Image (cartoon, rainbow, N blue to C red):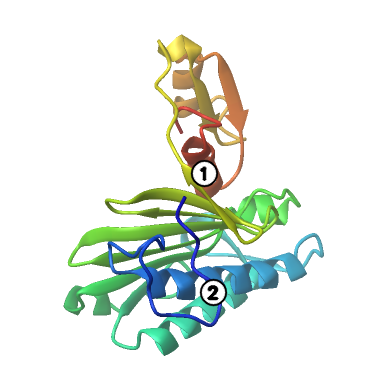
């Protein structure tokens, strides 16, 4: 089983590290550290109330969103000063159009769940090079777990200093035998009605796009 790269210290990639073949071991080390830092900032403010503002489209944003965003962008800029960054909480300056390497960040995916005191949110960071996804990371602060997927290499779940390679489970015999992951507030919507008509065996409800993606990667759900 591949050994997860250390959170700090060594940055020289070694054979067997997740990301070694793709040449992104150092990038993974940096983003794992930043995701955990952002997760701690978010948890420090979880279930404490606070002001909620609204962006365009009535999407909520909190102090936790902004602090996590600032920490990730600062860390990425220090480590990879020539790269472009696209973040959900920061205006897009279109610098990405001139760069080979572009980071994509959602510092607090599941803000609505965060506001409702539900432990169903995630930190998401990904890297694209020359327009192709190279790797993506989803950190679940409330579970102290991180999932990474690397183009051409597979996916891992990292927790407590150990790594576990994730293998998608075999497809169910039919949609009626499947488990679907879906958002909590989709009843009565087009998506909710479609799932009712498909009639899967089981529906797992969760907030956060990232957390539902992790449910599929772990094999806890067949589709999101």
Is any atom of residue 100 visible in this view? yes
Residue 205: name its quadrant: top right
Q: Residue at x 60, y 35 (%)?
A: 185
The residue most toward the right is: 48
**In front: 35, or 149?**
149
Does residue 45 show up? no
Q: Marks 1 and 2, Cα distance to the nearest angstrom? A: 19 Å
SS category of the residue bearing label 2: helix
Give residue 37's position: percent from left, percent from top: 62, 74
Which element type, helix, strand or loop, lies under badge 1?
A: helix
Residue 189 in percent (x, y) is at: 50, 28
| Residue labelled with disc 1 | 214
- At 47% from the left edge and 40% from the top edge, which residue is drawn? 217
Label 2 packing within 10 angstroms: few (<14), some (14-19), many (20+): many
Indicate the position of residue 138 as horizontal and vertical percent values: 51, 56
Which residue lies at the image location 45% right of the left edge and 28% below the top edge? 169
List x then y, in percent, for residue 53.
63, 66
Mark carried by residue 34: 2
């Amino acid at each position: 089983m591949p050994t997860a790269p250390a959170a700090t210290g060594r940055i020289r990639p070694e054979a067997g590290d997740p990301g070694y073949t793709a040449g992104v071991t150092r990038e993974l080390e940096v983003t794992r550290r930043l995701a955990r830092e952002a997760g701690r900032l978010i948890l420090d403010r979880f279930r404490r109330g606070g002001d909620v503002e609204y962006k365009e489209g009535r999407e909520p944003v909190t102090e936790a969103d902004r602090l996590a965003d600032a920490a990730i962008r600062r860390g990425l800029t220090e480590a990879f000063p020539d790269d472009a960054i696209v973040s959900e909480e920061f205006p897009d300056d279109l610098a990405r159009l001139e760069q080979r390497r572009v980071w994509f960040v959602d510092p607090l995916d599941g803000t609505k769940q965060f506001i409702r005191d539900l432990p169903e949110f995630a930190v998401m960071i990904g890297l694209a090079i020359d327009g192709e996804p190279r790797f993506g990371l989803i950190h679940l602060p409330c579970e102290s777990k991180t999932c990474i997927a690397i183009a051409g290499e597979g996916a891992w779940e990292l927790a407590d200093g150990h790594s576990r390679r994730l293998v998608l489970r075999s497809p169910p015999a039919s949609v009626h035998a499947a488990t679907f992951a879906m958002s909590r507030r989709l009843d009565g919507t087009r998506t909710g009605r479609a799932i009712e008509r498909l009639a899967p065996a089981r529906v797992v409800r969760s907030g956060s796009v990232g957390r539902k993606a992790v449910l599929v990667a772990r094999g806890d759900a067949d589709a999101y």
